[in-house]
Amino acid sequence: MATSKKPEKPRTPGPARAEARCACGAVALEIAAPAQWAWHDHSAASRVAHGAAYATYVGTWKSRLRFLRGEDNLTSYVEPDTGAIRRFCATCGSPVSYQRKRAPNNLNIPRALFTSGVGREPRYHLRIDELREWAYLGEKLKPLKGFPGVVWTGAGKRR
Ligand SMILES: [Zn+2]
């Protein structure tokens, strides 16, 4: 039996990956980590597209993204004003990507879809002037009596 006396060469670690999936799991993708950028988008367009106070995105070059499944299960909406392309899972409606017309090689993936860290913290806020006054901004909260797990700001002044 031939055995090598050479010490085994340490394996070169591959690039770290971060995996994302939609609510129903039909669509899954991975990007190379760390992601290129991460940001909070307070624009009206993203707020409505997500049905949320604002959207937090992780950006990647298209070449660093790979669909694991469900790419053919995406449906698209092209914003008439900007030409931006928003893709959603056709089964559950989760937003999956946001591609700006002026940056066709970049894809922005909702941070909430990732099941792990992405190696990049969202430190930038775009369109902060479009932030709604009802968005939660970390105000002090207190338990709501009689409703375990529910907290509220109290009956202070209306915003
Ligand atoms: Zn889905």
Image: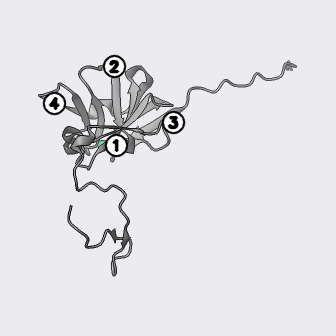
Q: Which residue is mark 4?
A: 79
Local packing at callout 2 (Cα closer than 10 Å; few below 14, some 14-19, many 20+) is few
User: Which three-letter amino acid code belongs to the residue tagged 2?
Assistant: Asn
User: Which three-letter amino acid code belongs to the residue tagged 3?
Assistant: Gly
Q: For residue 68, which quarter of the picture?
A: top left
User: Which three-letter amino acid code belongs to the residue tagged 4?
Assistant: Glu
CA gap between label 4 and label 2 equals 18 Å
CB at mark 1 closer than 8 A to ligand 1? Answer: yes
Local packing at callout 4 (Cα closer than 10 Å; few below 14, some 14-19, many 20+) is few
CA gap between label 3 and label 4 equals 30 Å
Query: Pointers 3 and 4 in contact (CB under 8 A)?
Result: no
Does label 1 or label 2 sit earlier along the sequence?
1
Q: Which residue is mark 3?
A: 119
Q: Residue at image x 44%, y 27%?
A: 36
Question: What element does badge 2 sit on?
Answer: loop
Q: Which residue is mark 2?
A: 105
What x and y, as percent, mark residue 55? 30, 43
Nearest the eye: 126 or 12: 126
Nearest the eye: 9 or 5: 9
Q: Which mark is residue 113?
A: none
Q: Which mark is residue 22?
A: 1
Does label 1 or label 4 sit earlier along the sequence?
1
